[in-house]
Image (cartoon, rainbow, N blue to C red):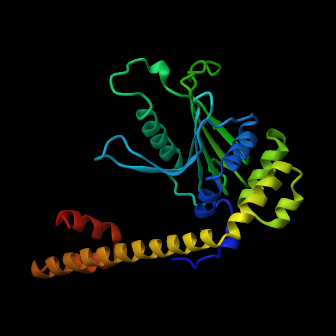
Amino acid sequence: MNQRKSLKELNLLDKFLFDEAMDDPENVKTMLDIILSQNTNLKHPPQTEKEQRTSIDNRQIRLDVYAIDEDDVIYEVEAQKENTHNLPKRSRLYQGIIDSKLLPPGVVDFNLLNEVLIVLIMPFDLFGYGLYRYTFQMKCQEIPELKLDDGATRIFLNTRGKHPELVSPELIELLKYMEHSTDEISEACESKRIQEMHRRVCQIKASEKAEVKYMQTWEEKILIKQEGERIGLERINRLNQKLIEQGRFDDLTKATSDSSYQEKLLKEFKI
């Protein structure tokens, strides 16, 4: 695991600081107002690390920031530092699971579904067009101006965009600040709202309670990683033992240098 940065070194794109900062409704409101160029009035305090699943047996997801405004519009915002090469489909999963929880059992009026906006903020250009912002809504392929109007919007934000003429200067400042949440960047911002957000972020970084929580979170991640490595080693040892027992030495040799073949053998032995 990478060396742990101190709490004061974290930026808003770091998951821990993002979750802590977005526990504050004012930070969520500021972020949404700037991203969407609107005045957002939250109905309830935002939730961070909200667990969602369609049933107890199904896959769960944890939403970084989940908020609802006074018009019952739902916002889900994620800070994503690494390109996992699955973000479009991951956003689709988020959309589906959120939608599945919106109507009580037995309700068949689908017009009651809330409008949902999913926002992913990233320090890389997912689509390669050099934009700060990519907004996706369903449209007709044959008639491009025909919008499906299903109430679903997905927005991908790139902190390293190259076309400032297409977005507001304040959004560019926000994205730059989220990637580099420092005094220097805050002071260079003309936005008073971002400077006020920075003041609140500094309070988190200076908090002993947040420092303890951050250390505990880091230690938990190390323990989870170590447990995963232990389980993985046990699986490999069991596989090697079975291959030796069956005299499959060529398979054993190949598995040591070919991870795909090793995984195939693990499935074969149901390990």
Taking 144 as reference, is 220 above or below it?
below
**Up-down relation of residue 1 to residue 268 (above or below):** below
Identify which residue is drawn at 60% across, 70% down: 209
Residue lying at the far left of the rendered structure:
246
Q: Is residue 239 left or right of residue 41?
A: left
Give the residue displayed 78% in from the left and 60% down from the top: 199
What is the x, y in percent for residue 255?
28, 75
Residue at image x 65%, y 76%?
6
Instruction: Pinpoint residue 99: horizontal percent, then vertical percent.
Output: 45, 33
Count the labels in the image: 0
Q: Is residue 133 left or right of residue 95?
A: right
Quadrant in the picture for residue 115? top right
> Camera-side residue: 237 or 175?
175
User: Which of the two residues, 135 or 183, is positioned nearer the viewer here?
Assistant: 183
Residue 70 picture location, percent across and down: 63, 30
* Quadrant location, the C terminus: bottom left
Q: In this rendering, does residue 61 appear at all?
A: yes
Q: Quadrant of residue 148?
A: top right
Residue 129 visible somewhere in the drawing: no
Measured as percent of width and height from the top left, residue 41 is found at 68, 35
Residue at the image position 34 percent from the left and 72 percent from the top: 258
